[in-house]
Each structure stands twice: as structure tokens, then as C-alpha cells.
Amino acid sequence: MYEVKVYVMYKESILDPQGEAVKSAIHRLGYDEIQEVRMGKYFEMKVTKKEKSFIEKRIEEICDRLLANVTMESYQYEIMEAR
Amino acid sequence: MYEVKVYVMYKESILDPQGEAVKSAIHRLGYDEIQEVRMGKYFEMKVTKKEKSFIEKRIEEICDRLLANVTMESYQYEIMEAR
């Protein structure tokens, strides 16, 4: 089995209103050392073991079609062997 | 400066309805090798450089007070030196 982690974030050029809101809340609590916050989505998946290059291709398809809006968001993923 | 990454997920024992919904959508698209999906929140922060142990303490406070609902969610973080 593989364990796959996917991170989806707004692209750098896109304003991230959730991250801005979280930053304001952090500052209201007095944590002034936090300069910037960006917020994204995180997915952990368990995947049936097959050829790794096949799984990479499939994960990219799932990200492109479902998990990320590639116009505004970028994604990264890690595939690890598990068990 | 530090770059801090924080991952917040429902605890294993808590049902994750968003993850279940994403899994169903993935299966409807025909990606049957995906066995399990859990969805969480991901934060990237830029933090002013101070003593690392101090920053660890502050990040844990921010997670406990603001980013995670520790009754239902668990979090992990990584602190990396940047620039």
C-alpha cells in the first residue's frame, strides 16, 4: 500500500482571504512574530499498491480533475510506501 | 526567518465527512485504487527568527488556541529555517 499526501494552496499571485483572516486572528492574540499565513487543503490517502509511475499519473489526474482548481491553486504531493 | 508548516486533521477515531465525500467523488471518476481519504487543513507561515524553542512553544499555543479544535483534531508542525 502507498500513503499519499497532497497539499493544495492558492498560487502565490492569488490573494488568500482565509490565510489573511487567520493572520489577523493570530495577531489579535498577540503573536506578532507571525508575519504571513497562507491556508490550504491537505489530503491523506491510502492507495492500493501498483507500479509507482502509474500511481503518480493517477494522483496527478485526481488533483487536476478534483482536488485543485488549477487556474487558481497549485498542488504538491508525496507518495510513500506504507506497511 | 522560519517557514512553518502546520497540518490539522480530524483524529483517527473521528469520522471525517469531507474525506468520505472526496473519496466517493474519486471513485465515481473511476480511481478505484484510492482506498481511503482523509481531509485536513494546511497552513504555511513565515515567522520572525527567534530562539527555536520559543517559536515551538508559540506555534503549539497558536495551534491549541486557534488552528485546531483539540477535542476532535490533532496537529503536526514543521519548523524550517528559510533564507
Image (tube, coloured by chain):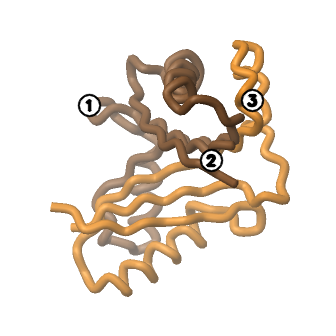
Chain colours: A brown, B orange
Check disc 3 and give the amino acid type.
Lys
Residue of label 1: A13
| Residue at 84 percent of width and 48 percent of height | B15
Residue to which mark 3 is pinned: B23
In this view, the residue in front, B8 or A4, is: A4
Q: How many marks?
A: 3
Q: Position of residue B76 (x, y in %)?
A: 55, 65
Question: Closer to the N terminus: mark 3 or mark 2?
Answer: 3
* Front residue (pair A35, A7): A7
Q: Are marks 2 and 1 on the same chain?
A: no
Which disc number belongs to residue B40? 2
The residue positioned 60% from the left and 41% from the top of the image is A43
Q: Position of residue B7 (x, y in %)?
A: 54, 56
Q: Residues within 10 Å of mark 2 (few under 14, many from 20)?
A: many
Q: Residues within 10 Å of mark 1 (few under 14, many from 20)?
A: few
> Residue A72 appears in which quarter of the rendering?
top left
Name the image quarter holding residue A59: top right
Mark 2: amino acid: Gly
The quadrant of the image that shows the C terminus of chain A is bottom right
Alpha carbon separation for disc pair 3 and 1: 30 Å
Residue mark closest to the camera, 2 vs 1: 2
Residue B18: quadrant of the picture: top right
Which of these two is toward me, A70 or A77? A77
Q: What SS does tag 2 mark?
A: strand
Identify the element where label 3 is drawn: helix
> Looking at the picture, does residue A28 appear above or below residue A40?
below
Give the distance between the C-alpha atoms of the residues marked 2 and 1, in whole angstroms: 23 Å
Most extreme residue toward the left is B83
